[in-house]
Image (spheres, rainbow, N blue to C red):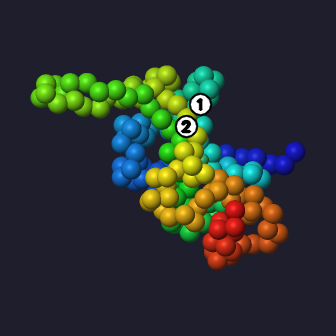
Amino acid sequence: MAFVGFEESKEVRQLAESIIDEHHPHLKDAKQQIGFYLREGNSKWAGKAKKCTAFERHMTDYMLFVFINKAAWKAMPEEQRAALVDHELCHFTREEWEEPDPKDQRKWVKVYGSATDPDSWGIREHDVEEFSEIIERHGLWDTGIETFAEAVREADHQLTISDVQRLSRVK
Ligand SMILES: [Zn+2]
């Protein structure tokens, strides 16, 4: 059984929080409900987004998890890290509805389900092979980004940054 380890990552959280502020309004008040972890050990994916089970909520107090493959993270330049984390955040959906604006009854405002209610949260699959908004924000290079780690694992040598860029285009 190969070693698998998890560590909470301030580095991933920091990047995620800045991306949330810019692009994910439905996550802005829920940053503390998401756990960000680096996962050490082989995996077929570079990143994974998950809604916590009841037991995982009990153990961690989080509602949602983002897992990032540690080897992939270490090999990625900053802009690829941003695309990967942005991608994972795109998987999270939240219940939302419109209510009359308390300040101006003629207007409607968007209201989100409680960040600490598990029923508020959901996971969506990719709308195309890649989320269209990720392509808009980061370009086409990252299509198949979640399978990036597989390419890392299969390449039997230490990857340089140009290798990383080449591999992420191939996948
Ligand atoms: Zn995905």
Q: Please report the residue visible at 71 percent of the width from the left and 58 percent of the height from the top.
A: 149
Q: Three-letter amino acid code at disc 2?
A: Arg
Q: Please report the residue visible at 50 percent of the width from the left and 38 percent of the height from the top.
A: 92
Residue 141 x, y percent position in the rendering: 57, 66
Residue 2 x, y percent position in the rendering: 84, 49
Label 2 or label 1, whichever comes before in sequence order:
1
Residue 48 falls in image quadrant: top right
Mark 2: few, some, or many residues within 10 Å (few <14, many ≥20)?
A: few
Residue receiving disc 1: 52
User: Which residue occupies the foreground of this view, 54 or 148?
Assistant: 148
Mark in front: 2 vs 1: 2
Ligand 1 within 8 angstroms of badge 2 C-beta: no
Name the quarter where the C terminus is drawn. Answer: bottom right
Dot 2 falls on a residue whose secondary structure is loop
Disc marking residue 124? 2
On the picture, is 68 further left or further right than 5?
left
